[in-house]
Image (tube, grey):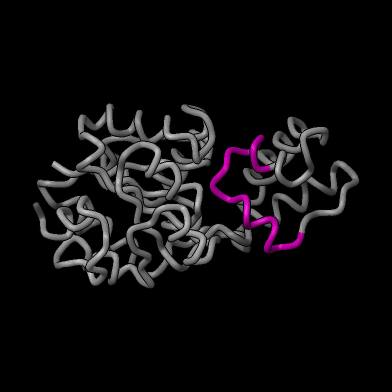
Amino acid sequence: MKLVVFDVDGTLVDSQHLIVAAQGVAFAEHGLTPPSRSVALSVVGLSLPQAFRRLVGEDGPIATLSESYKRAFNALRLDPAHEEPLFPGMADLLVRLRDRDDIRLGLATGKSRRGVEHLIAAQGWQGWFATTQTADDAPSKPDPTMLRQAMAEADVPPERTVMIGDTSFDMAMAVAAGAAAIGVAWGYHPAGALYGSGAVTVVESAAALGDLFSGPLAEPEAGSIAQEIARGG
């Protein structure tokens, strides 16, 4: 049995417009100038306190910004102008992996438990994931606790686990937990940052990601864990 754990924002879901808009509301409520779009998206994947700590510093209004952001995010999510579409091909890939008897699926995300449950209900994913780890369950990425809890809950060891994500936080978490790290190029951190944080490979599309589970990896130097998974071993 293999465990394939997905990050959410930037990997499965294109939530960038909603995230930037909610940050803008939170900063405006505090009379602060919001960060640029690129800076705003650079902290995606961290828990809210860690994200705002990076944006405003240790002495900034971290707790109240986090609360403002959550209120804004939940309100804006109801507006059709701020939808959270899945990235192309990811819905079909999840179905393919869900239907395999040698794979268990998981989620590990900086989203809140409430946000994950909303997403699962909206997408009809109930019962698809052997484990869902959120910002409410463990320290922020790249701390490995979240992924270690996922592996324990799914009863799959690190050498049979892959973390798929779009940020260096995802890759570093996987490495620290002893799992393989696979990056996706359509998210919020560049491929160089993903490789630099431990990714064994970075894929350009959902189709290329799916190929890793049905054929050999293109990178001969890729980690043995990912190679085993690609071979179905």
For the record, the magenta segment spans 36-51
In the image: residue 86, left or right of residue 157? right
Measured as percent of width and height from the top left, residue 25 is found at 77, 49
Q: Is residue 138 above or below residue 39?
A: above
Q: Residue at 70%, 44% (x, y): give it.
A: 54
For the view shown, which residue lies furthest in the front direction? 221
Nearest to the observer: residue 180 or residue 149: 180
Q: Position of residue 61 (x, y in %)?
A: 81, 34
Answer whether residue 165 is magenta in the image: no
Query: Which SS type dominates the magenta stretch?
Result: helix
Q: Residue at x 17, y 54 (%)?
A: 229
Quadrant assignment, res 108: top left
Q: Quadrant of the N terminus?
A: top left
Residue 134, placed above or below residue 217: above
Q: Is residue 119 left or right of residue 41?
A: left
Residue 40 painted magenta: yes
194 left or right of 203 in image: right
Residue 5 position in % (x across, y down): 32, 45
- Residue at 70 percent across and 58 percent down: it is 39
Which quadrant of the view contains residue 51?
A: top right
Q: Position of residue 191 (x, y in %)?
A: 47, 66
